[in-house]
Image (cartoon, rainbow, N blue to C red):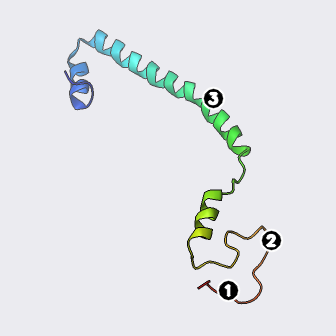
Protein backbone atom coordinates (compact mmCIF):
# COMPACT_ATOMS: atom_id res chain seq x y z
CA UNK A 1 0.00 0.00 0.00
CA UNK A 2 1.40 3.41 -0.93
CA UNK A 3 1.37 6.38 1.43
CA UNK A 4 -0.59 8.64 -0.88
CA UNK A 5 -2.20 9.05 -4.23
CA UNK A 6 -5.01 7.23 -5.92
CA UNK A 7 -4.01 3.82 -4.52
CA UNK A 8 -4.76 4.86 -0.93
CA UNK A 9 -8.18 6.23 -1.93
CA UNK A 10 -8.99 2.97 -3.66
CA UNK A 11 -7.74 1.03 -0.62
CA UNK A 12 -10.12 2.98 1.63
CA UNK A 13 -12.98 2.23 -0.74
CA UNK A 14 -12.09 -1.48 -0.57
CA UNK A 15 -12.55 -1.54 3.24
CA UNK A 16 -15.83 -2.65 4.82
CA UNK A 17 -18.38 0.19 4.82
CA UNK A 18 -18.29 0.83 8.60
CA UNK A 19 -14.47 0.90 8.72
CA UNK A 20 -14.23 3.08 5.59
CA UNK A 21 -16.62 5.57 7.20
CA UNK A 22 -14.43 5.73 10.34
CA UNK A 23 -11.33 6.37 8.20
CA UNK A 24 -13.09 9.14 6.25
CA UNK A 25 -14.39 10.74 9.46
CA UNK A 26 -10.91 10.65 11.00
CA UNK A 27 -9.43 12.27 7.88
CA UNK A 28 -12.17 14.92 7.85
CA UNK A 29 -11.58 15.78 11.53
CA UNK A 30 -7.81 15.87 11.02
CA UNK A 31 -8.08 18.34 8.15
CA UNK A 32 -10.59 20.44 10.09
CA UNK A 33 -8.39 20.72 13.19
CA UNK A 34 -5.27 21.36 11.11
CA UNK A 35 -7.06 24.31 9.51
CA UNK A 36 -8.44 25.59 12.83
CA UNK A 37 -4.98 25.39 14.42
CA UNK A 38 -3.53 27.61 11.66
CA UNK A 39 -6.06 30.42 12.08
CA UNK A 40 -4.36 31.94 15.19
CA UNK A 41 -0.99 31.85 13.41
CA UNK A 42 -2.39 33.80 10.45
CA UNK A 43 -3.80 36.40 12.84
CA UNK A 44 -0.48 36.69 14.65
CA UNK A 45 1.36 37.02 11.34
CA UNK A 46 -1.01 39.74 10.14
CA UNK A 47 -0.52 41.76 13.32
CA UNK A 48 3.27 41.29 13.11
CA UNK A 49 3.32 42.53 9.51
CA UNK A 50 1.70 45.79 10.61
CA UNK A 51 4.82 46.60 12.65
CA UNK A 52 7.38 45.94 9.88
CA UNK A 53 9.49 48.89 8.77
CA UNK A 54 11.82 49.58 5.87
CA UNK A 55 15.37 48.47 6.54
CA UNK A 56 18.09 50.24 4.61
CA UNK A 57 20.31 47.83 2.65
CA UNK A 58 23.78 48.96 3.73
CA UNK A 59 25.50 46.15 1.82
CA UNK A 60 24.02 47.37 -1.45
CA UNK A 61 25.15 50.94 -0.77
CA UNK A 62 28.67 49.71 -0.01
CA UNK A 63 28.80 47.63 -3.23
CA UNK A 64 27.53 50.50 -5.36
CA UNK A 65 30.18 52.85 -3.94
CA UNK A 66 32.95 50.29 -4.66
CA UNK A 67 31.96 49.58 -8.28
CA UNK A 68 30.98 52.34 -10.71
CA UNK A 69 27.37 52.09 -11.84
CA UNK A 70 25.07 54.17 -13.99
CA UNK A 71 23.10 55.73 -11.15
CA UNK A 72 22.19 59.19 -10.01
CA UNK A 73 25.17 60.82 -8.32
CA UNK A 74 24.93 60.11 -4.61
CA UNK A 75 23.39 56.69 -5.33
CA UNK A 76 20.54 55.01 -3.57
CA UNK A 77 16.88 55.92 -3.36
CA UNK A 78 15.75 59.47 -2.75
CA UNK A 79 14.10 60.29 0.55
CA UNK A 80 10.33 60.48 0.34
CA UNK A 81 9.06 63.65 -1.24
CA UNK A 82 12.46 64.67 -2.67
CA UNK A 83 12.68 65.17 -6.42
CA UNK A 84 15.62 65.23 -8.81
CA UNK A 85 16.46 68.73 -10.06
CA UNK A 86 18.57 69.17 -13.16
CA UNK A 87 19.85 66.62 -15.66
CA UNK A 88 20.65 63.11 -14.59
CA UNK A 89 24.13 62.02 -15.64
CA UNK A 90 25.92 58.75 -15.21
CA UNK A 91 29.35 58.84 -13.55
CA UNK A 92 32.23 57.92 -15.87
Disc on the earlier residue, 2 or 1: 2
Question: CB atoms at circles 3 and 2 under 8 Å apart?
Answer: no
* 78 vs 7: above or below: below
Image quarter (top left, top right, bottom left or bottom right) of the C terminus: bottom right
Q: Secondary structure at mark 3?
A: helix
CA separation in Å, label 2 and label 1: 18 Å
Disc on the earlier residue, 3 or 2: 3
Residue 2 percent across, percent down from the top left: 21, 24
Residue 39 percent across, percent down from the top left: 60, 30
Q: Secondary structure at mark 1?
A: loop
Q: Nearer the viewer, mark 1 or mark 3?
A: 1
Residue 21 percent across, percent down from the top left: 34, 15
**Residue at 23% in and 14% down:** 15
Q: Nearer the viewer, mark 3 or mark 2?
A: 2
Q: Nearer the viewer, mark 2 or mark 1?
A: 1
Question: CB atoms at circles 1 and 3 under 8 Å apart?
Answer: no
Task: Between residue 45 and residue 33, name the one nearer to us.
Answer: 45
Residue 31 percent across, percent down from the top left: 45, 25
The disc at residue 81 is 2
CA separation in Å, label 1 and label 3: 50 Å
**Pointer 3: residues within 10 angstroms few (<14), some, or many (20+)?**
few
The disc at residue 88 is 1
* 91 vs 48: above or below: below
**Residue at 69% in and 57% down:** 56
Image quarter (top left, top right, bottom left or bottom right) of the N terminus: top left
Q: Residue furthest front?
A: 66
**Residue at 74% in and 44% down:** 51
**Pointer 2: residues within 10 angstroms few (<14), some, or many (20+)?**
few
Residue at label 3? 40
Q: With 12 as the anchor, is 31 left or right in this view?
A: right
**Pointer 1: residues within 10 angstroms few (<14), some, or many (20+)?**
few
Amino acid sequence: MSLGGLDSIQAISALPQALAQHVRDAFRMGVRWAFISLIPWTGLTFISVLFLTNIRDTDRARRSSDAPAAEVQGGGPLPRGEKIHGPVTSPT
